[in-house]
Image (cartoon, helix red, strand yellow):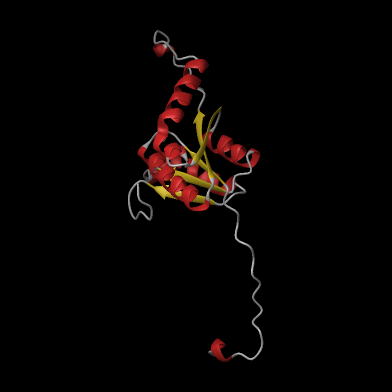
C-alpha cells in the first residue's frame, strides 16, 4: 500500500541528528600510489571542513630471520624512523602552502593495529585509507589492512582505490 507523504496531516516522526564533526582526518601512508590517492581525498575534505590531516606511516618490524641474507646489512630501527620521517615531511608540501594543517607521525608494529590505536588516541573523526585491490589469493594469504581497519576502528573509514571513479581533483 502506498502512502502519499506530501498530504500527511501529522508531523512525521523523523529525528534530526547532528552531523559528525570533521576536524581530525587520519590518512595512513605507505608511500604507494594508493595512499597518495587517499591523501588527495583527505586533503580535499580537510580544505572543505577546515580539518587537520594526520599522516601516519607504520613501520613493520621484520619478524623473519633468514640466515641466507645475514651478510646483507639490515637497516637499523633509527634508519627506518629517519627514512619514514623524511618521506612524511616531503609527502605533501603544497598542502601546507595552501593552509591545510598537517601532522605527521610514525609508529612501529602491525599497520591495522597501529592505525586503529592512533585513531583512538588522537580523537580522529575520519580515516581515509587507500586500498591495493590485490587479487583474492593475495587477499586470503595476506589479508587487507584497509579491511581490518574498517572492522576494528571506532571512527568512520573511507576506503579509496587507486583506480576508478574519483570525486576529488588531485
Q: How many marks?
A: 0
| Residue 151 in the image: above or below residue 14 | above
| Residue 19 in the image: above or below residue 90 | below
Q: Nearer the viewer, residue 108 or 94?
A: 94
Identified at 37% across, 43% down, the residue is 134
Splitting the image into 4 quarters, where does residue 107 fall?
top right
Left or right position of 131 against 13: left
Q: Position of residue 125 (x, y in %)?
A: 59, 48
Q: Position of residue 20 (x, y in %)?
A: 60, 56
Identified at 62% across, 38% down, the residue is 117
Splitting the image into 4 quarters, where does residue 25 fall?
top right
| Residue 72 in the image: above or below residue 160 | above
Q: Is residue 64 visible?
A: no
Q: Position of residue 100 (x, y in %)?
A: 48, 42
- Give the residue at the far top of this rendering: 71
Q: Position of residue 21 (x, y in %)?
A: 60, 54
Q: Nearer the viewer, residue 98 or 134?
A: 98
Identified at 49% across, 51% down, the residue is 158
Q: Is residue 100 visible?
A: yes
Q: Quadrant of the N terminus?
A: bottom right
Identified at 49% across, 46% down, the residue is 128
Amino acid at each position: 500500500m502506498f502512502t502519499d507523504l506530501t498530504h500527511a496531516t501529522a508531523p512525521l516522526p523523523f529525528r534530526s541528528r547532528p552531523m559528525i564533526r570533521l576536524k581530525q582526518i587520519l590518512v595512513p601512508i605507505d608511500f604507494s600510489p594508493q595512499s597518495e590517492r587517499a591523501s588527495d581525498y583527505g586533503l580535499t575534505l580537510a580544505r572543505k571542513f577546515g580539518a587537520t590531516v594526520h599522516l601516519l606511516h607504520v613501520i613493520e618490524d621484520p619478524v623473519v630471520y633468514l640466515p641466507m641474507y645475514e651478510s646483507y646489512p639490515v637497516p637499523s630501527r633509527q634508519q627506518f624512523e629517519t627514512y619514514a620521517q623524511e618521506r612524511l615531511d616531503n609527502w605533501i608540501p603544497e598542502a601546507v602552502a595552501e593552509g591545510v594543517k598537517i601532522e605527521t607521525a610514525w609508529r612501529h608494529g602491525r599497520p591495522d593495529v597501529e592505525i586503529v590505536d592512533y585513531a583512538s588516541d588522537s580523537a580522529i573523526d575520519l580515516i581515509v585509507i587507500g586500498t591495493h585491490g590485490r587479487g583474492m589469493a593475495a587477499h586470503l594469504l595476506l589479508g587487507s589492512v584497509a579491511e581490518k581497519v574498517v572492522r576494528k576502528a571506532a571512527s568512520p573509514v573511507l576506503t579509496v582505490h587507486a583506480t576508478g571513479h574519483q570525486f576529488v581533483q588531485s
